[in-house]
Each structure stands twice: as structure tokens, then as C-alpha cells.
């Protein structure tokens, strides 16, 4: 007799047997009880979570011959139930959407749907992987799906609902199948092994339930492979040897070396994993899983039931958690996930992996942006003393706490000459409040008037653009605020341009212009780049000059 794999042998036969899909089962049972069974269903979920199984159970519940009406407990013994289980019932047609995705197949389905079922109450069409149908095929389904004959039911199953057109989804009752939890998978695996009378280690079940990633079929398929490799007790060592799983001890050793900031040992541990046959992507996946366990353990102090670990793994995790802080683990996981796709598609996968491991191990030598900004803010600000300051008072001489960073501003009667003599030093004292752009522009000007707290500074005619920058975007108010913080004697600030000395001179004739010495291209370029107005614009927009053209060239 042919061998039946565990996934088929232990397929659920009733609503109550389906593992991990209680909400869907309960909803369908209530619909059958109240006679409110829809004409079309869309079952959505990842692989191996029970979509096709639930479709068959629903078909048996609707067509069971032992009862006079649909039932929530199909007998699984009548001819209809047995034929549905094997996929051979003439009234329950299972279609593979991948190989029957054309419009011709859908037209044939529509033509056959008008005929009543041979022995059951309903003719049921189960279309698996329905998202593989073409758009014309979907469109051909629309009319019959909206107004089907009363004896027809449709059940669609898909792993990619986004590929099912909205007009189809709107005509179906959608049920989302969730991933099955590791605890539920472990319980079912134990049940299967006991039914098969196979001895096993409890730690093995924990490993298998995590490797299944929420899919019961994947878990049973892994268990089938493991059983076929051994006639005795199923152990964790057998799992690592036969299924190519990473050696957890070596992974923990690599993480420990990273946490200890041992660069040499980190590279040696990485090399050891690669030489045992693990690919770079497998190493990254294993590190992500184990660092996720560390992150959860660290953030919950080991008290949460989120982690599915063996006792030995819990001991390792507790020891490794002391070597990492939570922020480092979050950074490592996100970095590994980004690096995974790069490594997978790179010809230098090993070099990238080793560089990433060294980055983790030597993280104390790297500063992130936040740390760098904190260090900059904590540094004392050095300010220049004013040249030729006014004579200090007796109180100032007695004050022994004055430092070189103190600002020596007269308490009263600041005059124009004082401002001219100490203009650059004054600007340096308020440089942080002014900002780079305003500071650079004000160093191009000179104070020309200071009366009753009103300060007037003068720009050269060529610097008119710089003056406009000072007046725009609230910069003038910011400049005045900075001067007021320096001394309360400043009340207002005006910006003006000096009279152009060349404006009164007669303009040169065209002949005289021709006799003027012409500047070379390099001289013109240097002159433009060093122009104060151009510099101000470059500072404002943090730009660079890439090309210079004359009006004629433009």
C-alpha cells in the first residue's frame, strides 16, 4: 500500500479539528445553523494554514448524505463525504487556478454550472490559488458569481488576495486565515507522534514548531523528513544534521563574541559557520531569530511567554542578554534585515557578512548621529574677548569667577567708534544666535550710525543681494534679538547701501570700452565665486558652483 504523508493522513475532518482557525470555523458553523450560507467564499491566508481543508469540510457539511439538511458535523462515512476527502466527488469540483487560468476554462465552468448536482444538495466549485486566473477569466466569472444558480456554491482560496480583482472580492464573503501559533503546532505534532508511536525529545518539538513559521503543513512535512532519516528516537542533533539547521551552539558563540567586542573571535566564528556548509543568508537569518529572542528577553526581563525556547536556550539567552543593550539589539536586527537582501544578490556575500559582523563587534568605536550631537552640545562654547575693552569696575576686578568667555560690554553709552573697533568680536560673541549665513553676511558690512539705540549698518552696492537676504525669512528680527541679548542698548537695526562712488562718473564710450584691458576667463570666474553676494547665496542654499555662462552664451 502506498505511503500517505502525515499532512494528508492527519488532515482535519471536521470544523472542530481545524487547528488555529477557531474564528473561521465558528462563523461557518453559525452560518450553516441559521441557513445563511453565502453563495461565494474567499479564503485568504499563507500556505498550509487550512484553507483547502476548510473548503472540503464546508463542502462535506453542505452535501453530507446522512442528514436531510446541511449540518455542522458531517459524518465522514457516507459516499459523498468519502469522495470529497479524496477529491473525487462529482458534485464538488476542485480546480487548480494555476493550470486552468484561461477564459476558455471559465466558460466551460459556466456552461456546466447550470446543471443540477448528481446526488448532493449543491454543486460546489473549489478553485485553489484563484489569484492565478487571468483578468479575462476573472471577468468571465463576474456574472455567474453575482447571480449563480441556487444549487451552486463557489469557494476560492488564495495566498495573494491583492491579485484578486476587487470586483471578484466584492461578490464573496472573505475569511482571513491567521498563521498558526508555535504552541498549537507543537501540541498537534506531539499528537501525531504519539499516534505514530514514535519516541521524541520535547526540545525537538519546540524547534520544529518555530521552523514551521505558522504553517501546519510545513511542520508536518519537516517531521516526515525527520522520521524518514531515523528509526530510533527523534533528537535535536538529528534535526541539525539531517535538515541542515544551523548549530545553535555556534550561533550563540558568534553572538557572544560580538557582545564581547572581540573582532578576531567574531571573524573566526563566522568562518566556522561558513565552513560547516551554512550560506551567508542562512547565517543572517539565524542571527535575526536569535537576536530577536535576546531583544524580547531583554525588554520583558524574561517574564513574558512570547518566547518559545528550551531550557538550555533560556540559559544561553540570559547570559548573552547581559552583553547587549536594547538599542543595540534593535539596531542589529534592522541592519541584518537590510543587509540580507544585499548579501543574497551580491557576488561578495562573505565580505559583506564579515564587514557587518565587525561593525557590530566594534560598535563602541562608532558614534551615531545622536551621540555626536550630544557631545557637540556638551562642549563649552569658546568666545573671543573684545579688543580694547572699557576699563573694568572695582566689582569686576573683585570677581574671581570671570572667565575668558565673559562678554565685556559697557553698561551704558556704547558709541559708534566702539562698535567699529570691536565689530567682528561682537559678532563672534553672538555667532550661535545669528547662524552661519547671517554671521557671514554681517562680517561684510560696517556700522555707520548708532544713535538712541538705533544701529545702521552699510552694505556695498555689490552686496545688495546680501542685504536682501538679511531682511528676508525673519532674519532681521533674529539679528536684532541677538544684539539685544548682547546689550539692552540695542533697540533697532537698519540695513542700507553706501552711495555708489562710480555713479557720478561719466560712462565710458564704446571706443574707450574696447581699449579697456579684458579679463581672462579664469579671472572672471574667480571674481564671481569670491563675490560676497554669490557667497551669501551659496551659504544660504548650501550650494556649489558647477558652471558659469555669460548672457550671450545663455
Image (spheres, helix red, strand yellow):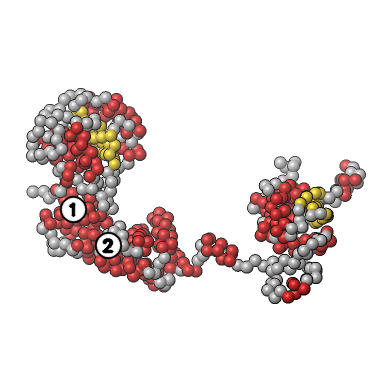
Q: Secondary structure at mark 2?
A: loop
| Res. 533 visible in picture | yes
| Front-most of residues 210 and 374 | 374
Position of residue 368 measured from the top left corner of the image (x, y, whole percent): 51, 62
Residue drawn where x is 70% and y is 72% of the image: 402
| Front-most of residues 238 and 458 | 458
Q: Secondary structure at mark 1?
A: helix
Give how far apart the Cα atoms at labels 2 and 1 are.
17 Å
Q: Are marks 2 and 1 in contact (CB under 8 Å)?
A: no
| Front-most of residues 340 and 74 | 74
Q: Quadrant of the C terminus?
A: top right
Q: Is residue 339 left or right of residue 51?
A: right
| Res. 440 visible in picture | no
Mark earlier in primary sequence (2, 1): 1
Which residue bears the numbered disc 1? Answer: 188
Q: Is residue 246 above or below residue 62?
A: below
Q: Is residue 128 above or below residue 201?
A: above
Instruction: Name which quarter of the figure residue 86 lies in.
Output: top left
Instruction: Name which quarter of the figure residue 398 lies in.
Output: bottom right
Which residue bears the numbered disc 2? Answer: 309
Position of residue 300 measured from the top left corner of the image (x, y, whole percent): 35, 61
**Which numbered circle lies on residue 307?**
none
Residue drawn where x is 31% and y is 60% of the image: 304
Structural crowding at the residue carrying mark 1, measured as other residues with C-alpha within 10 Å and reported as few (<14), some (14–19) or many (≥20)? some
Residue drawn where x is 36% and y is 67% of the image: 321
Residue drawn where x is 78% and y is 61% of the image: 423
Structural crowding at the residue carrying mark 2, measured as other residues with C-alpha within 10 Å and reported as few (<14), some (14–19) or many (≥20)? some
Q: Is residue 17 left or right of residue 498?
A: left
Count numbered badges in the picture.
2
Instruction: Name which quarter of the figure residue 224 lies in.
Output: bottom left
Position of residue 121 measured from the top left corner of the image (x, y, whole percent): 14, 29
Amino acid at each position: 500500500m502506498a505511503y500517505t504523508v502525515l499532512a494528508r493522513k492527519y488532515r482535519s475532518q471536521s470544523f472542530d479539528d481545524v487547528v488555529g482557525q477557531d474564528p473561521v470555523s465558528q462563523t461557518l458553523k453559525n452560518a450553516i445553523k441559521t441557513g445563511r450560507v453565502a453563495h461565494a467564499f474567499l479564503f485568504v491566508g499563507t500556505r498550509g494554514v487550512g484553507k483547502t481543508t476548510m473548503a472540503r469540510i464546508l463542502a462535506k457539511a453542505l452535501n453530507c448524505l446522512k442528514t436531510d439538511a446541511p449540518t455542522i458535523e458531517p459524518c465522514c462515512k457516507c459516499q459523498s463525504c468519502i469522495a470529497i476527502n479524496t477529491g473525487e466527488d462529482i458534485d464538488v469540483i476542485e480546480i487548480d487556478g494555476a493550470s486552468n487560468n484561461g477564459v476558455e476554462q471559465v466558460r466551460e465552468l459556466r456552461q456546466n454550472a447550470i446543471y443540477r448536482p448528481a446526488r448532493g444538495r449543491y454543486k460546489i466549485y473549489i478553485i485553489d490559488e484563484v489569484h492565478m486566473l487571468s483578468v479575462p477569466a476573472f471577468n468571465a466569472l463576474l456574472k455567474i458569481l453575482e447571480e449563480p444558480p441556487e444549487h451552486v456554491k463557489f469557494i476560492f482560496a488564495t495566498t495573494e488576495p491583492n491579485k484578486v480583482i476587487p470586483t471578484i472580492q466584492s461578490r464573496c464573503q472573505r475569511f482571513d486565515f491567521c498563521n498558526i501559533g508555535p504552541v498549537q503546532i507543537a501540541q498537534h505534532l506531539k499528537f501525531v507522534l504519539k499516534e505514530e508511536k514514535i519516541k521524541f525529545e520535547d526540545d525537538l518539538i519546540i524547534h520544529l514548531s518555530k521552523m514551521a513559521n505558522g504553517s501546519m503543513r510545513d511542520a508536518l512535512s519537516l517531521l516526515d523528513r525527520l522520521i524518514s532519516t531515523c528509526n530510533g528516537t527523534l533528537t535535536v542533533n538529528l534535526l541539525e544534521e539531517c535538515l541542515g539547521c544551523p548549530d545553535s551552539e555556534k550561533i550563540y558563540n558568534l553572538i557572544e563574541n560580538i557582545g564581547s567586542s572581540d573582532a578576531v573571535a567574531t571573524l573566526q566564528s563566522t568562518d566556522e559557520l561558513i565552513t560547516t556548509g551554512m550560506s551567508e543568508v542562512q547565517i543572517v537569518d539565524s542571527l535575526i531569530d536569535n537576536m530577536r529572542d535576546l531583544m524580547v528577553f531583554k525588554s520583558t526581563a524574561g517574564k513574558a511567554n512570547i518566547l518559545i525556547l528550551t531550557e538550555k536556550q533560556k540559559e544561553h539567552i540570559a547570559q548573552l542578554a547581559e552583553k547587549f543593550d536594547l538599542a543595540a539589539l534593535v539596531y542589529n536586527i534592522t541592519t541584518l534585515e537590510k543587509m540580507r537582501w544585499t548579501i543574497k544578490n551580491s557576488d561578495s556575500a562573505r565580505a559583506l557578512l564579515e564587514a557587518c559582523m565587525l561593525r557590530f563587534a566594534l560598535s563602541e568605536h562608532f558614534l551615531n548621529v545622536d551621540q555626536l550631537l550630544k557631545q557637540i552640545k556638551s562642549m563649552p562654547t569658546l568666545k573671543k574677548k573684545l579688543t580694547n575693552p572699557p576699563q573694568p569696575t572695582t566689582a569686576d576686578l573683585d570677581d574671581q569667577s570671570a572667565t575668558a568667555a565673559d562678554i565685556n560690554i559697557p553698561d551704558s553709552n556704547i558709541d559708534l567708534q566702539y562698535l567699529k573697533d570691536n565689530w567682528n568680536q561682537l559678532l563672534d560673541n553672538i555667532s550661535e544666535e545669528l547662524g552661519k549665513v547671517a554671521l557671514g553676511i554681517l562680517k561684510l558690512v560696517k556700522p555707520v550710525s548708532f544713535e538712541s539705540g538705533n544701529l545702521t549698518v552699510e552694505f556695498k552696492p555689490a552686496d545688495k543681494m546680501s542685504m536682501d537676504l538679511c531682511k528676508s525669512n525673519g532674519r532681521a528680527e533674529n539679528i536684532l534679538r541677538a544684539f539685544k541679548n548682547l546689550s539692552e542698548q540695542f533697540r533697532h537695526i537698519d540695513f542700507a547701501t553706501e552711495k555708489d562712488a562710480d555713479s557720478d562718473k561719466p560712462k565710458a564710450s564704446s571706443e574707450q570700452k574696447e581699449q579697456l584691458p579684458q579679463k581672462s576667463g579664469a579671472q572672471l570666474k574667480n571674481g564671481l565665486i569670491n563675490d560676497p553676494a554669490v557667497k551669501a547665496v551659496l551659504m544660504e542654499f548650501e550650494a556649489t558652483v558647477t558652471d558659469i555662462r555669460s548672457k550671450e552664451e545663455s
